[in-house]
Image (spheres, rainbow, N blue to C red):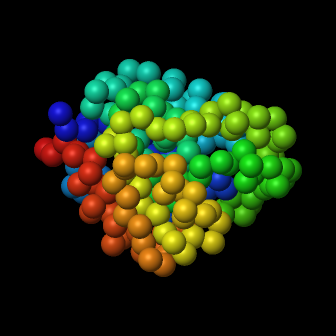
Amino acid sequence: MPTTHLLYLHGFRSSPASTKARMTAAAMAQRFPGVVWLCPALPASPKQAMDDVLLATAHWPLATTAVMGSSLGGFYATWLAERWGCKAVLLNPAVHPARDLAAHLGDQTVWHDPEQHFVFEAAYVDELLAQEIARITRPERYCAVIAKGDEVLDWREMTGHYPGATIKLLPGGDHALSDYALHLDAVLEFLDLLTA
């Protein structure tokens, strides 16, 4: 069955205004207007973020739902895909964000709007630990775009966490996937979205 509902989750210090989120939203509106699209602004607390998402999607048909996520959003998307049994597209996904973000406690700003501040608390590291997935099930549900040139996350760790998944490994690139436009079509094709 084609995907009828698509959830997009942004990364740490990111927002629905990110380039990848906006490009995906535009493609959905133009090419797949019949698909329900949700790209929420996620709170700093990982537990609150997932509680909010589960509440917002409580009425969604999980058999035809898919999730996309970038960086920390890819970590969240993995947690949801394992919970829901749905397809997931991951863009340079964080694998161990509790470890990586422990050094980023305190006041933070949003990349796309430095006027927006939030506090990343020590308790949030524990919340991330509680959400870690030791190993994925049914790798055929996963597609990951991973850049060897990612300056934030280790591509070997990312690819190693998704054995058997469809992985588009880029020889260069960066954490932001600045060439995302080149990979968008492949990502949308994997999702098998409902056409009007």
Q: Quadrant of residue 2?
A: top left
Q: Is residue 162 above or below residue 129?
A: below
Residue 107 or 64: which is nearer the viewer?
64
Residue 10 visible: no
Q: What is the quadrant of the N terminus in the image?
A: top left
| Viewer can see residue 61 | yes
Q: Relative to residue 178, is residue 141 drawn left or right?
A: left
- Which residue of the protein is positioned furthest toward the bottom in this rendering? 172
Question: Residue, x 62% and y 37% (percent of image)?
Answer: 132
Q: Is residue 47 above or below residue 92?
A: above
- Residue 154 coordinates in the image, percent (x, y): 60, 64
Identify the residue at image location x=44%, y=21%.
Answer: 58
Residue displayed at 48% across by 78% down: 172
* 5 sits to left or right of 131: left
Numbered label tally: 0
Residue 89 image offset from top left, x and y in percent: 39, 49
Instruction: Give coordinates of residue 50: x percent, y percent.
Output: 58, 32
Q: Residue 8: x, y in percent?
A: 45, 46
Q: In the displayed structure, would residue 59 be above or below residue 116?
A: above
The image quarter in which residue 87 lies: top left
